[in-house]
Amino acid sequence: MVIVKVPEIDKVMIQNDFLMNYGKRIAQIRKSRGITQVKLAELMDVEQPTVARWETGRRDPGVGTMYDLAKVLGVEASAFFIDDTQVPLGPKLFVKGSAIAGVWVNNWQWPEQEWRSFTGRADEGSDISMRFGLRLDGDGFDLIYPPGTILEFRAHYGNADIPAGKKILIVREREDGMFEASVRELAIDTQGARYAIGRSSNPSYMPIKVDQDEPGIVETVIAAVAIQSVKPE
């Protein structure tokens, strides 16, 4: 048997390359899940500069930390060593309820124990706390989506413009304190008025004027915008 001794300088180079590649994968996976370095540091109970050193290869996180990172980021530990040419995985998200497109539904959110996981969109940069899935039931969007399709939504806050054609989750609060939800497509007329319309073979689904006052309704808001559809097989 021939024993080949690796020069010390080569050992250092190998270790540095390993840490740089490992750190690069940490950064890639973190970003794909919409998590900032500050947030990851909070989840790992370390300071933000520590996360930065892991990602740049200037600090070895150690085996135990590697498994803790994998758990926090929702991946197998082996994901940190996959070649960079692999297609990035999206974050683990949850289908939190169901909606009948074009119909107002009261109990559209399921109890947490009934949530089901799915893989979110990999190139979406928003925080995962703002992202969730809903299952489409009924025929309100049957010209585009079959029943059972999962729409991934990003929560919508403030007065940011939403382009026409986007699929939206509309939520309205009733005077009795109950909330109703519906999934529609946003349409904007030449006067700038916003309507929520269906894409259905059923002609009974009428457009909803988003900004119009309705009897018994306190407020109607666009609560979320769809960013991905996952169709059933």
Image (cartoon, rainbow, N blue to C red):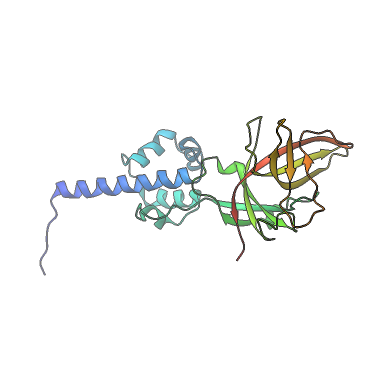
Q: Position of residue 121 (x, y in %)?
A: 53, 49
* Image point (48%, 35%), residue name: 38
Nearest the viewer among 113 and 227 is 227
Left or right, 15 with reference to 96: left
Q: Which image quarter: residue 98? A: bottom right
Left or right, 35 with reference to 148: left
What is the residue that sits farthest to the bottom in this orientation? 1
* Image point (48%, 42%), residue name: 44
Nearest the viewer among 209 and 130 is 209
Q: Across the whole image, how many numbered discs are drawn on residues?
A: 0
In the rendered view, tell whether residue 230 sits above or below residue 56. Answer: below
Q: Position of residue 40 (x, y in %)?
A: 48, 40
* Image point (65%, 54%), residue name: 95
What is the residue that sits farthest to the left in this orientation? 2
Nearest the viewer among 192 and 83 is 192
In the rendered view, tell whether residue 111 sits above or below residue 31. Answer: below
| Quadrant of the frame with the N terminus | bottom left
Q: Position of residue 75 (x, y in %)?
A: 47, 54
| Quadrant of the frame with the C terminus | bottom right
Residue 61, can we see it?
no
Q: Position of residue 106 (x, y in %)?
A: 81, 49
Residue 39, can we see it?
yes
